[in-house]
Structures are given as C-alpha cells and as structure tokens.
Image (cartoon, rainbow, N blue to C red):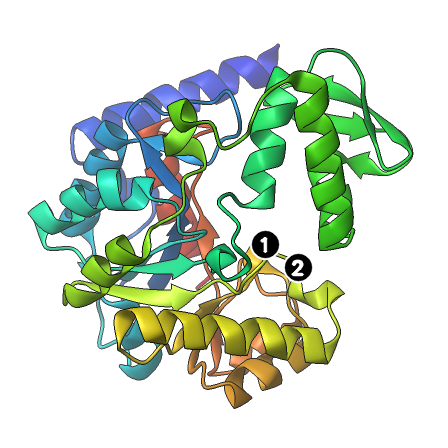
C-alpha cells in the first residue's frame, strides 16, 4: 500500500514538473550525453489488445515536440561518426517495418523536420505478408482458454501474454524454435480461432511496408532505411552461415528497392553474438544497433551502439522520464 502511494506521488510530481517545463531539476544539468530511442509502431489510438508496441499518433507527436525542444536530434549515422561536442543528442529508430510507420509516423516527423531510421524486416523475400510475432500476438488475443503450443500448455496473463510453468513466456519460447515450427503453430492457431492474422481490418497491426513506401521513405533526406534481417529470427540462435545469409539477402533486397547503400543494421529482438558483429561488418553494415548491450566488450566497440525501447505500457510523461533517466544514469 505504501509503495503504491509513493509511486503515485512520484508520478504526480513528474507530471507537474514536465507540464511546467521544469523537469530538468530531476536529472541535473550535465550535457554531452547520447541516447538512441527505439519505437516499433504508431497507430491512431494506442491499441493495447495485441501488444504494447503501438503508440498513439497524438502521443508520438508530443514526444517529438519534446525531443525537438530538449535535444539535438540527429540522423543515426552521426551518432557513430561525429563526436559529441557538449549537447544532449538523440536519434530516433523504428523496428520491424510495418506500414503504420509510413501512414502515422512519417507525417509527424516531416512536420517537425526530424530525422529517423527505419529498420525493415524483409519478409517479402519469402513472400510473407506478416511477421510471425504479429501473427502470434493477433491470434492469441482471439484465443479463448488455455493454449497448446509445440507440446506445452500456456495460460493467459495480462497484456496478452501467455505463460507455461515448464518453458516460461510463449513469445520467448517461440524465439528459440525454428521458423517452420513457428509457422506450423500459427497455422494451427489460425484454424482453431477461425481468424486470419493478416485480416485487412487489422492493417495497422500487421501490414508490412510496400516496396513503393520503402522507396518513398528512402528518397526523403530526413529518413534512412536500415536492415532488420529477413525472418525476424533471433540471430544468436542461427548458425554463422544462416546469419550471413539473412544479412546479405536483406541488404541486397533493400538496396535494390532504394537504389542506395544499406549500412545500418538493428538486430531482431536485440539478439546477436560477438561473432555476429564480425559477420555484419563483413557484410558491409557499418552501423550496428543493440537493445541493451549483450556483452561487456560492446561498450568499447565502435561498430555497435545501444538503444532504449519505448512502449505503450505507460504515459507520455513516464516515457519521457524513462528517456531522461536512462540518458543520465548511463553517464
């Protein structure tokens, strides 16, 4: 009870400070820090039925306005190539490559002249119209009762999460399985629920960027297209040859569409090994991004930078607090 009271008091205090423009007293005045933020999807309402990756467009607009006011917002490449001369710098990235980025995020970024990098999963190479995590999120939302997956029983948890006492969270379990096993599970679940995960009424939650949309984004000097590999598999679970194939195929596919070099790579699910960094560098990826460094050596490796993910599991002000807190805690 006391913990809840204290938490509510702190949230209320932060809200007052942010709304009055005095929130910097929470963090101090140090400058010269860098942070790279990661978004996934922008919809119109911040729909939480399927997962917490969708942030409402009006909320995203507020966050961009704050970034423009409080940070030097840079293209991603400059975070790698230009030394910080004393400002708090921020770069914006998007993962997965859903078309809601084009419809709902681009207009807001363009209005404010803010650069961003979009990491595209090249599922189209395999004629896929939906990423496997989105298919699972959509289908499990419509599933009733306990869930059977590859010999294990999962029970529903809040936020459309499913848990097994044997193997833990459903999504974490599926990340360790082969692409074929995931596809079999998705097909069985679709048949059981009578739902097609790529239903057109749910386009904001699964539809992938088209080639024309990718080409249009790449033609705008504000925006960069980067690779998010091909199958959205955890690269650390693949053999070196499989990793190399994913990275080379993705690069070739995106370069053909954009007619521009593809130099940036964001590891799906933040999954990689130290060998993966070498493979990616050999494939021509000069700028590699983690989601929380996996290895101590990464901190001094100029090929890779860390990122911080933002999700719709808290308010705009609490997300901005996360950004400021992370920025200062790491320095």
Q: Which residue is mark 2?
A: 234
Q: Which residue is mark 1?
A: 269
The x and y percentages for residue 310 are 42, 42
Q: Is residue 320 above or below residue 258?
A: above
- Left or right placement of residue 258 versus residue 250 in this view: left
Give the crowd class for mark 1: few <14, some 14-19, many >=20 residues within 10 Å: some
| For the residues bearing labels 1 and 2, Cβ distance under 8 angstroms | yes
Residue 144: quadrant of the picture? top right
Q: In front here: 116 or 283?
A: 283
- Left or right placement of residue 124 versus residue 26 in this view: right
Q: In front here: 14 or 102?
A: 102
Q: Is residue 63 visible?
A: no
Residue at image point 67% right, 18% down: 193
Q: CA distance from mark 1 to mark 2?
A: 6 Å
Q: Can you say which quadrant of the picture contains the N terminus?
A: top right
Q: Which element type, helix, strand or loop, lies under badge 2? A: loop
Q: In front here: 306 or 107?
A: 107
Residue 163: quadrant of the picture? top right
Give the crowd class for mark 2: few <14, some 14-19, many >=20 residues within 10 Å: some
- For residue 328, the mark is none
């Amino acid at each position: 009870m006391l913990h809840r009271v204290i938490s509510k008091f702190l949230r209320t205090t932060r809200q007052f400070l942010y709304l009055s423009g005095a929130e910097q007293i929470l963090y101090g005045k140090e400058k010269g820090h860098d942070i790279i933020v990661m978004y996934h999807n922008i919809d119109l309402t911040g729909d939480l039925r399927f997962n917490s990756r969708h942030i409402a467009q009006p909320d995203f607009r507020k966050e961009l306005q704050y970034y423009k006011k409080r940070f030097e917002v840079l293209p991603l490449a400059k975070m790698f190539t230009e030394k910080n001369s004393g400002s708090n710098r921020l770069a914006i990235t998007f993962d997965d490559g859903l078309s809601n980025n084009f419809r709902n995020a681009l207009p807001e970024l363009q209005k404010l002249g803010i650069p961003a990098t979009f990491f595209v999963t090249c599922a189209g190479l395999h004629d896929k119209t939906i990423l496997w995590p989105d298919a699972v999120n959509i289908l499990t939302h419509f599933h009733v009762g306990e869930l059977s997956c590859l010999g294990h029983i999962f029970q529903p948890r809040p936020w459309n999460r499913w848990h097994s006492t044997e193997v833990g969270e459903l999504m974490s379990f599926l990340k360790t399985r082969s692409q074929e096993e995931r596809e079999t599970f998705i097909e069985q679940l679709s048949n059981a629920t009578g739902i097609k995960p790529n239903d057109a009424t749910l386009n904001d939650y699964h539809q992938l960027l088209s080639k024309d949309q990718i080409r249009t984004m790449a033609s705008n000097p504000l925006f960069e297209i980067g690779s998010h590999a091909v199958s959205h598999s955890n690269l650390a679970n693949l053999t070196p040859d499989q990793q190399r194939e994913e990275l080379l195929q993705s690069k070739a596919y995106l370069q053909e569409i954009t007619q521009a070099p593809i130099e940036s790579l964001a590891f799906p699910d933040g999954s990689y090994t130290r060998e993966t960094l070498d493979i990616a560098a050999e494939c021509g990826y000069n700028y590699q991004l983690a989601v929380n460094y996996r290895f101590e050596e990464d901190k001094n490796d100029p090929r890779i930078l860390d990122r911080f993910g933002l999700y719709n599991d808290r308010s705009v002000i609490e997300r901005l607090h996360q950004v400021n807190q992370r920025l200062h805690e790491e320095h």
